[in-house]
Image (cartoon, rainbow, N blue to C red):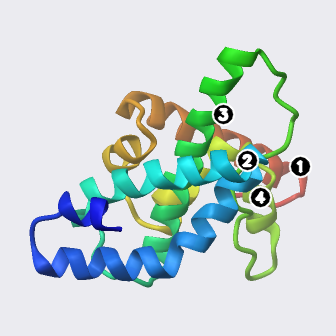
Amino acid sequence: MLIYLQAIESDEEKTLFEQVYLHYRGLMFYVANQILRNDRDAEDAVHQAFVSLAENISKISEAVCPKTRSYVVTIAENKAIDLYRRKKRLTEEELDGRAVGLPAPRSGDGSLAAAIASLPPRWREVILLRYDSGYTSAEVAKMLGQSAASVQKLEQRAKARLKKILEEEGITP
């Protein structure tokens, strides 16, 4: 943890990072391991996620809250996917169709939550970060390492799919 703390300047941010580290490291490892299916690779992805988190610690206001949880899970997922893709290029393995990402939280009557959960992982991630966690498109783009236009297109496609799913269920927006 000392390596990460060296990248952070203020004492408040160091304390915040320590709290995030202690609270979310297990969850981040679980998420990365679900994608990579290899403990060593998952540890590498979590390490890269914490490096990225240390560089962007100013984006976190509270150590333990749903917004922070969403943010750290997104970073861990993206680092794990990046590592998976790098390894795939080296070994030319086939992607096995497993859906990555955490399921959408289910609340209320379940129609919208079920529709969101049925979206492809990248689309679901953008929708949840934008509308559940309250990030702007620019912030989501930076978190995902994509352009703002790409995130807006993902959001547009996700909304269109949600509309179609809800219309098929007889629910009009």
Q: Say which label, 2 or 4, has the lower sequence index.
A: 2
At 30% from the left and 70% from the top, the residue drawn is: 60
| Helix, strand or loop at mark 3 | helix
Spatial CA span between label 2 and label 4: 17 Å
Secondary structure at numbered mark 1: helix
Eye-nearest disc, 1 or 4: 4
Mark sitting earlier along the chain (2/1): 2
Q: CA distance from mark 4 to mark 3?
A: 23 Å
Question: Residue 10 in the image: x percent, y percent?
Answer: 9, 73
Q: Which residue is identified by label 4?
A: 117
Q: CA distance from mark 2 to mark 3?
A: 8 Å
- Evaluate whether residue 118 shows in this view: yes
- Cβ–Cβ below 8 Å for labels 1 and 3? no
Residue 86 at x, y = what percent?
60, 25
Residue at which label 3 appears? 84
- Residue under label 2: 35
Which amino acid lies under the numbered mark 1 shown in the image of this protein? Glu
